Amino acid sequence: MYMTESEIVRNYKEAKNKNLQIKILADLNACEKIEIRSILIQNNIKLPAAVKKKKKIDWNKEINRIMKMQESGKKLNEIAQVYQVTSVTISRVIKKQQSKRGSEGYCLL
């Protein structure tokens, strides 16, 4: 991350095209768009609804980030806003991960 959170927020607020600005900020900071979205949400910035068709999310790749957000005290609806999905979807992803972890380490004879 090359910019501070306050620089990201200021730059985003000044942009005319908010959706495009998220991509630009991600490119400038050599990070994923989701990281920029997360910073904006942490700073109480209301994000625009997605304009394009949503890209399918590989939840197996995102689960660690989701679990860290949850452990840091984020509510399900805040996490869901980052991914532009419902809190029910995030809840299902977390439950699926917990059931996988619960089944690991046990050996059925």
Image (cartoon, grey):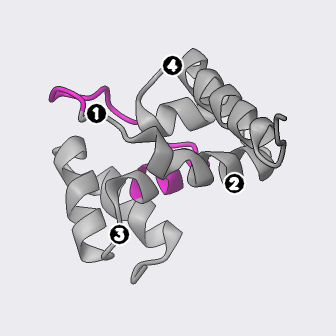
Q: Which type of secondary structure does the marked residue at label 3 adopt?
A: loop
Residue 95, quarter of the rendered image: top right
- The magenta segment: 36-54
96 to the left or right of 81: right
Question: Eyeballing the image, is 84 above or below 87?
Answer: below
* Residue on which disc 4 sits: 86
Which numbered disc, 3 or 2, marks the residue that appears first in the sequence? 3
Determine crowd level at label 2: few under 14, some 14-19, many 20+ residues with C-alpha closer than 10 A.
few
**Mark 3–mark 2 CB contact (< 8 Å):** no
Amino acid marked by disc 3: Cys
31 to the left or right of 102: left
Whole-angstrom CA distance, mark 3 to mark 2, is 17 Å
Whole-angstrom CA distance, mark 3 to mark 4, is 24 Å
Q: Which type of secondary structure does the marked residue at label 2 adopt?
A: helix
* Residue on which disc 1 sits: 56
**In the foreground, 58 or 15:** 58
Whole-angstrom CA distance, mark 1 to mark 2, is 21 Å
Which numbered disc, 1 or 2, marks the residue that appears first in the sequence? 1
Determine crowd level at label 1: few under 14, some 14-19, many 20+ residues with C-alpha closer than 10 A.
few
**Does 40 appear in magenta?**
yes
Determine crowd level at label 4: few under 14, some 14-19, many 20+ residues with C-alpha closer than 10 A.
some
* Residue on which disc 3 sits: 31
Which numbered disc, 3 or 4, marks the residue that appears first in the sequence? 3
The x, y position of residue 47, in whole percent, is 39, 36
Determine crowd level at label 3: few under 14, some 14-19, many 20+ residues with C-alpha closer than 10 A.
some
The x, y position of residue 94, in whole percent, is 66, 32
**Does 22 appear in magenta?**
no
Q: Which type of secondary structure does the marked residue at label 1 adopt?
A: loop
* Residue on which disc 2 sits: 68
Mark toward the viewer: 3 or 1: 1
